[in-house]
Image (cartoon, rainbow, N blue to C red):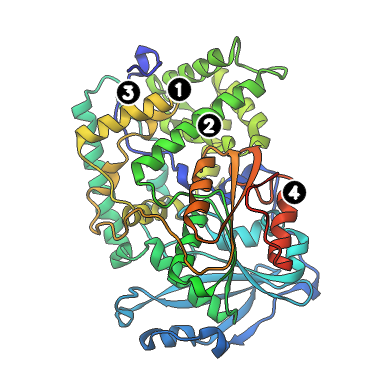
């Protein structure tokens, strides 16, 4: 089996630098023209003060957890238009007395009488639900939804404003993103270098984060959501989850089916898949996306790709190979190695509305200037113009996945996986190989195993799949809806990652009617 790549792009192992599963609404918003929300009308400002949970919402909980469910929460004005609070949750749910960690929450009150609260998670793992509400509330929720519901964003454990996973500082992150590998090194030399770097990174994370690294798994985060549900006095959880947020929501429903209310899971992950299957599915999805992008580009003026779609895709592969041989330098003086270049290239593929932005970045790079591509990569990494990083999304992504997924680090098995990835995606596959190296030296072994989630007894759960979704392929949504006992599947026939907020009125109306009126979409509905 051959890769279809030029000899100069012979597959070689590398650190996994493309955080594909983190392709969430939070990442994509950087390109869609969304800006910070305008100051709200004073009548829409969130209520502040001390709140405690309604005892009926707390219900029957273990006594050693009761203090967390019944804590007093101080909501304070923040970010001009919202109220914010810090919630305490146990570090270790199997031993709640071991210590507490903090969850940062932000709330926008309903513009009319609230039916309850909708919790939002934008994906990742590692994306900030706090930021998505603060910066882009009117993108991820409709005006009708905000009339009837308070909207609560939160940073899951280990993420950003909550008690965070801490690995690299800003300067170290910049240095890692400028690192390149010699193209003439042997596979054994490269593997040794990758192993050494992974060990150094794991040691740094352990030193700067401590025992939290062992407790940022998805099941623990889902249990935190039940405390949040009680503290806003909702008897059942109402939830809107995108991308990885679907895994978090489905896990919650499986743990607490009787407390699951109106859940919408958009851009679904199949929880029965292992890490290698997920990576392979994404490789296939992004290969399909790049072909769709090239086909669209070739219908427009000034497209840099000539000939057929196959020819255009091959030109992209040749561009990657050229950057791998000789990393480029941006106008700000930063080095742009192939890993960072490809990271920037991939980001606009999450939303077909951003394809023209990608075309311009490629055109600039072909002319010798990678600055636009580096800008896209910076958006993906959440790097600000001043050189700071607005979140710890990369570190949190790795920490969560290392606990959620057993990963092979056997060189032979990783080589076999690499060949599958290259076959599925001649353009991106080789950049996704050897990811198991990263978690091998982690001090904390995986605590979860991939398995179907049924959530037996839960209210209807709406699962949305997009036919051209590269990050969470469409078939994952059908699989999750089939696994969930009460799953209801909805399809958007479109390109890009997730649907609600970026697709059409059909999806918007179905989701809003479910949340607002309880109208369950027809299973199999298509938009």
Estimate how packed mark 4 is, as few (under 14), some (14 to 19) or many (20 or more) residues with alpha carbons within 10 Å.
few
Disc 4: which residue: 506
- Asked if the residues shown at circle 1 and circle 3 are in contact, with their CB atoms under 8 angstroms apart, the answer is no
Query: Disc 1 versus disc 3: distance between alpha carbons?
Result: 12 Å
Residue displayed at 27% across by 52% down = 202
Q: Distance between the residues labelled 4 and 1?
A: 39 Å
Whichever of labels 1 and 3 marks the residue nearer the N terminus, that label is: 3
Measured as percent of width and height from the top left, residue 136 is found at 67, 56
Q: Is residue 399 above or below residue 154?
A: above
Q: Position of residue 71 (x, y in %)?
A: 49, 86
Q: Mark 2 points at which residue?
A: 345
Q: Name the residue under label 3.
A: 11
Q: Distance between the residues labelled 2 and 4?
A: 30 Å
**Front disc: 2 or 4:** 4
Dot 4 or dot 1: first in sequence order is 1
Residue 334 visible to an observer of this rendering: no
Categorize mark 3 by other alpha carbons within 10 Å: few (<14), some (14-19), many (20+): some
Image depth: mark 2 or mark 3 in front = 3
Q: Quadrant of residue 260?
A: bottom right
Regarding mark 4 in the picture, which secondary structure is present there? helix
Q: Do the residues labelled 2 and 1 touch (CB within 8 Å)?
A: yes
* Residue carrying label 1: 320
Marks 4, 1: nearer the viewer: 4
Task: Tell me which label, 2 or 1, sits earlier in the chain.
Answer: 1
């Amino acid at each position: 089996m051959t890769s279809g790549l030029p000899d100069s792009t012979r597959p070689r192992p590398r650190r996994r630098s493309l955080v594909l599963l983190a392709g969430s609404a939070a990442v994509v918003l950087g390109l869609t023209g969304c800006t910070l929300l305008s100051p709200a009308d004073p009548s829409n400002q969130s209520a502040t003060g001390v709140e405690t949970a309604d005892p009926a919402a707390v219900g029957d909980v273990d006594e050693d957890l009761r203090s967390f469910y019944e804590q007093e929460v101080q909501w304070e004005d923040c970010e001009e238009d919202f109220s914010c609070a810090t919630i305490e949750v146990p570090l270790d749910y199997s031993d709640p007395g071991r210590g507490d960690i903090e969850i940062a929450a932000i709330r926008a009150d309903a513009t009319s009488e609230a039916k309850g609260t909708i919790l939002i998670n934008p994906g990742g793992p590692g994306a900030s639900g706090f930021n998505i509400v603060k910066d882009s509330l009117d993108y991820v929720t409709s005006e009708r939804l905000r009339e009837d519901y308070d909207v609560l964003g939160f940073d899951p454990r280990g993420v950003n404003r909550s008690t965070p996973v801490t690995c690299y500082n800003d300067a170290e992150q910049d240095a890692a993103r400028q690192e390149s590998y010699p193209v003439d090194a042997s596979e054994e030399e490269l593997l040794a270098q990758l192993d050494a770097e992974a060990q150094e990174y794991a040691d740094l994370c352990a030193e700067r984060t401590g025992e939290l690294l062992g407790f940022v798994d998805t099941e623990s985060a889902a249990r935190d959501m039940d405390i949040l549900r009680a503290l806003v006095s909702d008897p059942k959880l109402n939830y809107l989850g995108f991308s990885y947020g679907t895994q978090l929501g489905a896990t919650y429903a499986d743990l607490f089916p009787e407390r699951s209310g109106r859940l919408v899971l958009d851009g679904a992950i199949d929880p029965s898949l292992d890490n290698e299957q997920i990576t392979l599915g994404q490789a296939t999805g992004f290969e399909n996306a790049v072909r769709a992008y090239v086909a669209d580009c070739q219908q427009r003026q000034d497209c840099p790709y000539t000939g057929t779609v196959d020819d255009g895709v091959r030109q992209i592969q040749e561009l990657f190979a050229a950057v791998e041989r000789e990393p480029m330098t941006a106008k700000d003086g930063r080095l742009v190695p192939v890993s960072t270049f490809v990271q920037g290239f991939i980001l606009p593929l999450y939303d077909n509305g951003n394809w023209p932005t990608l075309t311009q970045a490629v055109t600039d790079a072909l002319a010798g200037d990678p600055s636009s591509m580096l800008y896209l990569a910076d958006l993906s990494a959440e790097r600000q113009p001043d050189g700071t990083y607005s979140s710890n999304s990369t570190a949190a992504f790795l920490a969560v996945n290392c606990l959620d997924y057993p990963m092979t680090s056997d060189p032979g098995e990783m080589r076999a996986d690499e060949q599958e990835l290259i076959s599925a995606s001649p353009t991106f596959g080789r950049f996704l190989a050897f990811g198991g190296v990263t978690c091998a030296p982690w001090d904390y072994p995986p605590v979860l195993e991939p398995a179907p989630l049924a959530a037996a007894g839960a209210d209807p759960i709406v699962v949305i799949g997009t036919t051209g979704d590269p990050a969470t392929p469409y078939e994952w949504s059908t699989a999750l809806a089939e696994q969930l006992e009460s799953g209801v599947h909805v399809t958007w026939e479109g390109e890009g990652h997730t649907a609600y907020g970026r697709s059409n009125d059909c999806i918007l109306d179905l989701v809003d009617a479910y949340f607002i009126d309880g109208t369950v979409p027809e299973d199999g509905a298509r938009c």
